[in-house]
DNA sequence: GATCTTGGTGCAAATGATTCTCATTAAGGA
DNA sequence: TCCTTAATGAGAATCATTTGCACCAAGATC
């Protein structure tokens, strides 16, 4: 039994919800997939087990609420998630040109954010820091091609 | 002539695009509206001038590319923008309960971000920092009601 | 300022991610 | 095992955003 399964089970019980076969499959698939995934991708991995796309969409918010995954980026009209458990908070560096997403540690910012939150008495849930611009390779290309 | 009008004109010229009446109306409306606005709201302010919703949707990305506005938050399925010009970068504190969005200064984080960017050689375009959680009032309510 | 080239516009239809409806099924406590 | 109630699959519905198209208007050129 993995840690995320326990956490999901506890979350559901506490909310009076049921741990079903489909929900478990969504959870497992989410944790097997790499960093970023969208509903459709998740679905493609478990449709064979007769889990419907609707159920995927219904389960995703539960996983978010349970603190297991988080909305990472919205790209090309689709929501992309990533798992949080065992994956420390981080900054996303999104290249506008090649669309690649790099990540860096958040710790150097954490302190300042906590102080800010304290002063306005805000209870922090999720932190999303996305920076768009040009990655190293693409900013070199700009010089050469434009 | 306002500064944002000049900036938009220059941007369009540089891209070989035309400054049309409709585009100007979209720009003006965007800068007249308060902080956050969505396409539909913008449209409601200029539809009387026979500007179509499609044109609003077509112009918004141009304003973003011109560095005049930026996607602030996606909320309730809709994209919400805000103008950047004369509006320093900031952090959004989004309450999950009452949906209100507060803003605070970004300067305490700027230095750390710049250092990070430098070390991975990333050319920063836009910075989006959204924090979800509970605002002061709503976290008080939680105690009382749950 | 007339002409011409090319992009822009309004309108309506299309798209596509996400949500909802509903009849049926299955957790999980008693 | 039974029973209550939430969950599910399938497909229809929703709704923000995009697109196709026939007509229009910037703005450069003469």
Image (tube, coloured by chain):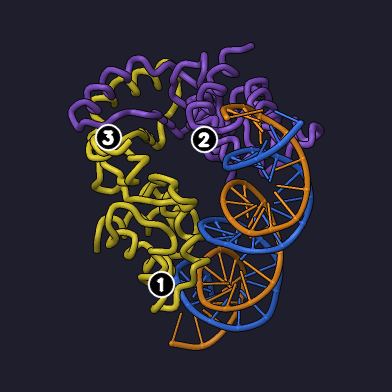
Chain colours: A purple, B yellow, C orange, D blue
Q: Is residue B142 above or below residue B41?
A: above
Q: Name the residue under label 2.
A: A73
Q: Measure the alpha-carbon separation of dots 1 and 3.
A: 47 Å
Q: Which residue is drawn at 69% across and 27% down?
A: A25
Residue A43 as seen in the image, left or right of residue B41: right
**Could you say whether the residue bearing mark 2 is in a helix, strand or loop?**
strand
Q: Could you say which is closer to the camera, residue B62 or residue C2?
A: B62
**Residue B102's image quarter?**
top left
**Residue B63's image quarter?**
bottom left
Q: Where is residue A60 in the image (x, y as percent from the top left)?
A: 58, 35
Q: Residues within 10 Å of mark 3 (few under 14, many from 20)?
A: some
Chain ID at mark 3: B
Residue under disc 2 on the same chain as residue under disc 1: no
**Residue A78's image quarter?**
top right
- The label nearer to you, 2 versus 1, is 2
- The label nearer to you, 1 versus 3, is 3
Residue ranking furthest to the left: A119
**Could you say whether the residue bearing mark 3 is in a helix, strand or loop?**
helix
Q: Residue at x 18, y 28 (%)?
A: A119
Q: Measure the alpha-carbon separation of dots 2 and 1.
A: 35 Å
Q: Mark 3 points at which residue?
A: B139
Q: Mark 1 points at which residue?
A: B21
Q: Residues within 10 Å of mark 2 (few under 14, many from 20)?
A: many
Q: Position of residue A5 (x, y in %)?
A: 60, 18
Instruction: Specify which label sits upstream in the sequence, 1 or 3.
Output: 1
> Quarter holding the N terminus of chain B?
bottom left
Q: Measure the alpha-carbon separation of dots 3 and 2.
A: 27 Å
- The label nearer to you, 3 versus 2, is 3
């Amino acid at each position: 039994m993995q840690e995320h399964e326990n956490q999901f089970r506890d979350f559901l019980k506490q909310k009076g919800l049921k741990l079903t076969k489909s929900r478990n499959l969504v959870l497992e698939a989410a944790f097997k997939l790499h960093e970023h995934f969208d509903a459709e991708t998740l679905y493609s991995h478990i449709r064979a087990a007769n889990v419907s796309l609707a159920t995927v969409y219904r389960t995703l918010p539960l996983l978010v609420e349970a603190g297991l995954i988080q909305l990472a980026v919205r790209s090309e009209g689709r929501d992309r998630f990533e798992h949080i458990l065992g994956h420390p908070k981080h900054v996303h560096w999104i290249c506008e040109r090649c669309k690649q997403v790099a990540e860096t540690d958040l710790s150097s910012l954490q302190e300042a954010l906590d102080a800010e939150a304290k002063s306005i008495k805000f209870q922090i849930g999720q932190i999303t820091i996305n920076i768009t611009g040009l990655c190293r390779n693409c900013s070199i290309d700009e010089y050469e091609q434009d």
